[in-house]
Each structure stands twice: as C-alpha cells, then as structure tokens.
Image: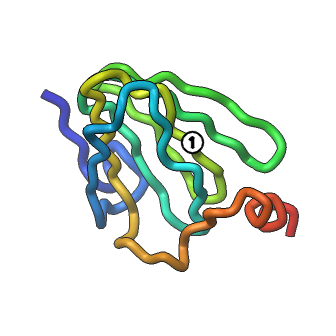
Amino acid sequence: MTAINSLDQIPFEIKRVYFLYDVPNKSDRGAHAHKELYQLIVPASGSFEITLFDGKDSKQFLLRQPDEGLLVPPGLWRDLSNFSGGGICLVLASMLYTEEDYIRDLKYFRKFKNE
C-alpha cells in the first residue's frame, strides 16, 4: 500500500486526479508544459519514461514502481514515452483542468521560458 497526502508527502493540495491507460506499447503522450500546475506522476502499473525540458537542458526518468513518482513543477516541458504493455500513468494535479494553463507548442514554450 502507498498513501499520498496533500501538503504532506507532496507540496501541493490535490485538486484533480487522472489516469493514462490503454496506451499502445512504446507510444508517446504528453508533449506539453503548464504555466502554474504542479503534478506528481506515478506509474500505477507497468513502466514509462518521462523527459523533462526546461528550455535549455533535458533529463529523462524511468518510472517503473508504483511506490515512486516524479514531481513536475510548472514551467517544464514534459514528454511521456515508451509505455510498457499495460502501463498506467497516475497523475495528481494541483489545479482543476484549465486549457489556459497549457503550453502545447514547443516553439512558444521556448519563448515563454526566455521572457
């Protein structure tokens, strides 16, 4: 059993929870950034990789255990890739869904980071 408590194990209040599942093996998801949203990304089942990009440098993480997660603060471009068969990605978010918080264009993201 793994428990996650708002403002205790993670530095934000959980306002939204969603799952990515039935992602075809080796597929990619994500490819966006957020202006204000914090996320804790957890591999509920299987494994996947996350690449984070801050506008200059990128770093890749392999998530494969349901008792580990990756805290993604605002202002980072994220790509999820290489989902294993049956992989499930659990996302705990600090805000309700709002399209205005998304940056979906990498060119605009680079400009946003350099302002």
Picture coordinates of residue 41, whole percent (x, y): 40, 42
Classify 63 as above or below 100: above
Give the residue drawn at x 28%, y 26%. 67
Q: Quadrant of the N terminus?
A: top left
In this rendering, would 76 be left or right of 29? right
Q: Which residue is at the front of the view, 53 or 73?
A: 53
Task: List the single residue furthest toward the front.
Answer: 24
In this rendering, would 29 be left or right of 91? right
In this rendering, would 30 be left or right of 69? right
Task: List the single residue furthest toward the right.
Answer: 114
Q: Which residue is mark 1?
A: 79
Tag 1: amino acid: Asp
Q: Which residue is at the front of the view, 63 or 79?
A: 79
Give the residue drawn at x 52%, y 47%. 72
Picture coordinates of residue 45, whole percent (x, y): 24, 27
Disc 1 crowd rating (10 Å Cα; few below 14, some 14-19, many 20+) is some
Picture coordinates of residue 25, whole percent (x, y): 37, 26
Label total for image: 1
Location of residue 86 (image quadrant): top left
Give the residue drawn at x 45%, y 33%. 27
Badge 1 element: strand
Classify 113 as above or below 62: below
